[in-house]
Image (spheres, coloured by chain):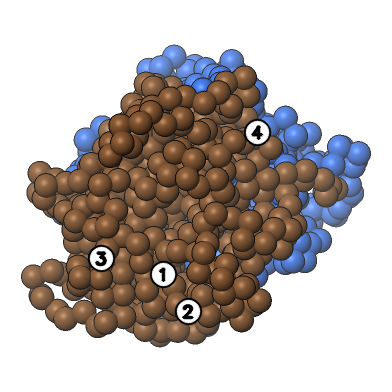
Chain colours: A brown, B blue
Amino acid sequence: MTGNKAKNKLGKQTLVFPNKPIIASGGAIVGVKEGQGPLGKWFDTVLEEDTFGEKTWEKSESKMLKEAVKMAITRGGKAESEIEAILTGDLLNQLMSSAFMARDMQIPFIGLYGACSTMAESLLVGSVLIDGEYGNNIIAGASSHYCTAERQFRMPLEHGNQRPPSAQWTATAAGAILLAANDNQTANEPKTLIVDNSTANPITEKTVCITHGTFGKIIDTGLKDVNQMGAAMAPAFVDTVLNHLEDTGRKFSDYDMILSGDLGHIGKQIAMDLLADAGIPVKDLVNCYDDCGAMIYEKEQDTHAGGSGCGCSASVFTGYIYKRMKKGELKRVLLISTGALLSTISPGQGESIPGIAHAVCIETC
Amino acid sequence: MTGNKAKNKLGKQTLVFPNKPIIASGGAIVGVKEGQGPLGKWFDTVLEEDTFGEKTWEKSESKMLKEAVKMAITRGGKAESEIEAILTGDLLNQLMSSAFMARDMQIPFIGLYGACSTMAESLLVGSVLIDGEYGNNIIAGASSHYCTAERQFRMPLEHGNQRPPSAQWTATAAGAILLAANDNQTANEPKTLIVDNSTANPITEKTVCITHGTFGKIIDTGLKDVNQMGAAMAPAFVDTVLNHLEDTGRKFSDYDMILSGDLGHIGKQIAMDLLADAGIPVKDLVNCYDDCGAMIYEKEQDTHAGGSGCGCSASVFTGYIYKRMKKGELKRVLLISTGALLSTISPGQGESIPGIAHAVCIETC
């Protein structure tokens, strides 16, 4: 009764997008600390204070996500009425940030949960909708907030508890991307814009599109320390990378950058060790691999093991990597957002931490 | 830069599936109370006790979902290695039931959150993946458990608090569907099987497929009473129904059954009133409309306003409606699972309850 004919499937886990959905625009908004980090100048908006004028942290986070979504829509030259669906998620119980963001928009809403892997998950599902010609304009996004995450998963801030050196800092950040159908007539027409303020030279903007995606399996090595998120997620990242490379027949160095979501400094080192063990040349790891959680804060910012949270890879990709791709500095990037699928109560029931990682291949085209 | 050519989009919110993904098989498992209800004999498995042999309710729910998924895979004649993705969700914080179910399966996992709308959401996204030829075999499912939901959203059971008459009873139930690529050569070949034990007559099994889907917008009328979920979700259900009918150019009576997820008795009545106000003939509502939450329990079972929970529409559709379709008793069904997107803390922050409803059109083909 069932056929076996999926023409847009490649290997075991990878999807191909022959229509190459384009990233038409993006919006990245971050909190004060993230704005003070090394990528601060790249983000579209840096908050003056992390409440964003709201009475609760959850409402602040939801407002950040809404601003990122609206920014992506406006910058893409679209009206809200032209957007066919919003695909977002966050870390909060029942996706509170996303649900209340979407409540204020008259746009169909598809809630996703992949913990910190959500940005890649939303880009992947969104790309399927565009590539399969089920829509022309789809929003993919994700958010997190240090204060909502601490309260929910760890301790209320007022408790002032000490964080162990392996703990990561949940980024106060949101990113949203407008995915759009690729009109081949115009997609390859370079546009001119001024990006580089230092030289004031006009730069030719490249079109950025999504060509492949790899949905990840859950990998759980039995780790139970909730202050070791990088270690819990690194094996899932490595599994998805290796499956993606096998499915596509590519090498690690075929990418200008392979970017993990938020393994942080410790998880990044574990991932590099595991990838080296799997035969990836160390020079390729040094040249092509980085981690959003390791990139978003300076060492001096006292975040211990680096950044985390759905908003980490969402804002670093949208605010920084995507803009570098538009400038032509990066031609092919594999974004692999990584998630730790523990719940607020699963550690208390003796459960270990399931890790997951989804990948999207983004190229200039 | 962006085109406007999505050929599989119909009207404002509806997707068309020209390849007609088929429902190859399903698995529905319910708790003791649900087994004693009017649909008890239809469910594939009825638990002897709701712990399912586990030490925590959350683990019981996760095990139920895993059993439903495995049942769908086995009944579809597939091995786990042939399944390209599992798309599920549940009501628990961070999708605990789904994450720990998927941890034990070596299959890519896509977590979805739409509260009680999750079954239709997963069928919709799963149908997109199959119809767009990104996969051949995809699992869509959802679960809920009375004891996990009460503990998380309301009171621990030991508290013995009194439920108001408008409260709904979260179904202890899980349902999973195996969606498969439609091989046109064989899809229309009727198969013979014995379903009807009362007559022992062989019945020709129909092929059941998914032809359309409509992603819903969030509708929030400002209602804040967390014991009035049916009232909170009914307007979203009506909005999605009306948009689906407008997009497809169909009438309410073009469906043998239009099935809301879990509005319960009160929400069902509100939905009927709103649909009648919108011009749907009352006789059509009487003939074609029902609600999974109103169907799953007997009035005498003391559930007050009826059933709810992601597992409600998941099990009623998978266990009952799908089987009636295979028997040819229903030819065209619109399943509209309905969700209340409040969180565990949003009511405490003064927020009203956002409602959402996603629709899938299921037909014999």
Of A220 and B194, nearer the camera is: A220
**First of labels 4, 2 by sequence position:** 4
What residue is rendered at 63% in x and 56% in y? A254
Give the alpha-carbon distance from disc 4 to disc 1, as whole Å.
Answer: 32 Å
Q: Amino acid at mark 3?
A: Glu
Q: Amino acid at mark 4?
A: Asn
Q: Nearer the viewer, mark 4 or mark 2?
A: 2
Q: Which residue lies at the image location 57% right of the left edge and 74% below the top edge? A: A282
Name which residue lies at 47% across and 79% down: A270
Closer to the chain start, of discs 4 and 1, is 4
Dot 3 or dot 4, earlier in sequence: 4
Determine which residue is flagged by label 1: A263
Q: Are marks 3 and 1 in contact (CB under 8 Å)?
A: no
Residue matched to label 3: A298
Residue A344 circle label? none
The nearer-to-camera label among 3 and 2 is: 3
